[in-house]
Structure formats: structure tokens, C-alpha cells
Amino acid sequence: MKRVLILAAVASACCWAQPAQDCQPAPSNAGGALYPCIHSDLRVTFRIAAPDAHKVLVATNTADSGFGKGPVDLVRGEDGVWNVTVGPVVPGFHYYWFVVDGIEVSDPSSESYFAHNKELSGVEVPEKGADFYDVQNVPHGDVRIHWYRSKTTGSWRRAYVYTPPDYDGHAGARYPVLYLQHGSSENGSSWSRQGRAGLILDNLIAAGKAQAMIVVMETGYATQPAALLAPAPAPAAAAAGRNPSAFERIVVDDLIPMIDSAYRTLADREHRAMAGLSMGGAQTLQIALSHLDKFSWIGCFSAPIRSFDAQTAYNGVFADPAAFNQKVHLFWIGAGTAETAMHDGAKAMHEALDQAGIKNVFYESQGTAHEFQTWRRDLADFAPRLFR
């Protein structure tokens, strides 16, 4: 514990060591910190002051993006500052953390982002020529934090709600809604912070490439107390022979009604979409395909699809291609080419749907793995197709 306290106290000493000329501070750094810094060849240098430490490593959950296949050792300098350069790293956003004498700690020089069920550091490696998720000189919407009471869980919940740039200035206008879900171990803030969803929508709307829309980002976990458990599944679920999860009940019974009540929405299935990444993609498939009376636009980003039969999957929703194609205006599937399992599953689903006569879109993010650069690209392709 003493070493961790010393680390936190002296880490700011890293800031006085000016990086090499070709190494620029990462956009994700906190308060003017100079490290991590990004080299012109996309290598990344990490630095942290820990004079009493015996061993320091840097670890990430996206080792296949250029960080190395495991935690990487930092080298101690005579001044007690530890350094390492890794990469080149695939452009985009990557979580990381330090391991100081066996204890995992965040980098005080980085902004914090919720992932792995805790606050972690993150490094943004700019992609040359890509500005679709950057702050641009365009009108900007707002991301609002909206607290509401869930009947399903009997507790207060927090949704992050993006409203488009003209929302407050056009009191008579109503908007379609995209429900956008995060991945496992993340939360409702992840799409707006790590994913930059608000900026992506700002830029698309300003360029006339996407319709102005409301985007709702909720935390995809829920536990239904025993006292609130319904004696039987809801009628639609019972007819399909399935028992909906607590989160599915929240989306259908609590979240959608709340959003339609609190915001100026176009409150019908024709103007309601759902999409999600990884775990959120799986939730989207389960919820949206079970409630086609609520959703007509569906996006699946890097979902874990291990086997797929178009005749039987999701209670046979694809068994009648003509009926499905009439109800669903967009069924969108995407994955990064470097996330092998997710990509293979998504491609197999796409091919099976094609053979079955189900209209769908398949998108590949070239060279990216199970990471936010994949999902930013997914959103940038998916959103312009909505509500047309």
C-alpha cells in the first residue's frame, strides 16, 4: 500500500520529462500530461514515476493491437522513472493499466474510463486521415444523464441520452430514437466517452449523412428482486416459450416508456432502432428480435455468434423471410477483421441470412480487433442508414 501511495504522489513528476520531438501526448491524457505519447510511426511510450518499486509492467486487454502478447516490462531509470515503448499500435482507443510490484494501478497521467468493472486508463492513438469521431467545427448535441425509477428492479437507474444539436432550439420537432448498448464490463457512459458516439452523430448530422436522432445509452445489467418477479413471463414471451431477462424487461417496460414520456420522440417502431457492441450486440439480437412490435432497425456489432441456423434462431423469427423483410427495415451485422471469432461468427450469420433470403448488411472494419475503433466505424456506417 505504501508503494501505491508513493506512486500516486510522485507520478506527476513524469510531466516534466519532455518527449522526443516525434512523440506527441495522447489526446486521452489528463490535464496536460506528456505521457503516454504517440510516435510518428504509432509506437507508444509509457512512463511512470515509482522510485520505490521493484517491477513495473503495462498491461492491456487488446494485446493483438500491437501492445504485445502479455504485460510488458518497463525499464527503471536512475531517477526512479520507469519507461517502455511498444508498438506500433493499431490506431484507436485502448485500455491499459500498470502493474506495480504485483498491484494493478491506473496511470495518473491518463483520463479514466469504466471497463473491466472498474476505472481504467486509456490511450487514444490517432488514425491518420480519420476525423469522423473528432471534435469538429459543427453544431454539437448534448449528452444528458437521466435518472429514472425502474419498476422492474425497484431501484433508480441512470441512462445517458444524446440529444441532437437542434433539440432545444426546435420545441415542436420530434425525433427517432436509437437505443445503443455497450459491451461486457463497461457501462452506460462507454459509448459517449470511449466510443465518442455523440461526436460521431454530430459530424454525420452536420454533413447531412444521418438523420437527427436521440441516442439512449443504458447500463446493460439488471437484477430483478424476488419480490418483483412476475408470476409468469409477459404474454409475448410466454407465447414464444421464453422468459425475458431483467434487462430486457427494463428496456421494454421501463426505458422505452420513460424516454417516450420525457423526450420528444417519434414513439413508434418505424422510428425506433436498437444496436450494441459485443455483449450489447447479443442483447440487441435477443431483445429487438423478440419485440419487432417495438423495433424495425437492428444493428449487431461484434456480437458473440457461435452457431446460427436461419430457420430456428431466435424462436424462428427468420423462418418467414418475406414477413421479416417487411417488418425490419435494416438488419446490420459488423465486426473487425482482426477479431477472428467475432468476425467469423458475423460472416457466417450474414451468409446464412443471404441464403435464406433475409435482407441484411454486412460490414467489415479492416485491421481492427475487439475494440472501440471497430465499433466507432460500425456506428459511422450504421447510423446514416437509419430512419431513411
Image (cartoon, helix red, strand yellow):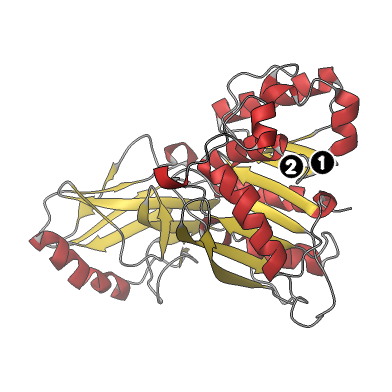
Q: Considering depth in this image, is 320 or 97 the residue closer to the camera?
A: 320
Q: Considering depth in this image, is 344 or 177 the residue closer to the camera?
A: 177
- Image quadrant containing the N terminus: bottom left
Picture quadrant where residue 77 is located: bottom left
* Residue 302 seen in the figure: no
Label 2: element kind: strand
Left or right, residue 266 beside residue 163:
right
Residue drawn where x is 56% and y is 27% of the image:
340
Q: Position of residue 204 (x, y in %)?
A: 77, 62
Left or right, residue 199 beside residue 387:
left
Picture quadrant where residue 369 is located: top right
Q: Considering depth in this image, is 347 or 255 the residue closer to the camera?
A: 255
Q: Position of residue 108 (x, y in %)?
A: 30, 66
Label 1 vs 2, first from the N-terminus: 2
Q: Which mark is residue 298?
A: 2
Q: Amino acid at mark 1?
A: Leu
* Residue 12 to residue 68: above or below: below
Badge 1 crowding class, 10 Å Cα cut-off, few under 14, some 14 to 19, many 20 or more, is some
Residue drawn where x is 75% and y is 46% of the image:
294
Label 1: element kind: strand
Q: Amino acid at mark 2?
A: Ile
**What residue sits right under mark 1 in the picture?**
330
Q: Position of residue 287 (x, y in %)?
A: 65, 39
* Residue 94 to residue 208: above or below: above
Q: Are marks 1 and 2 in contact (CB under 8 Å)?
A: yes
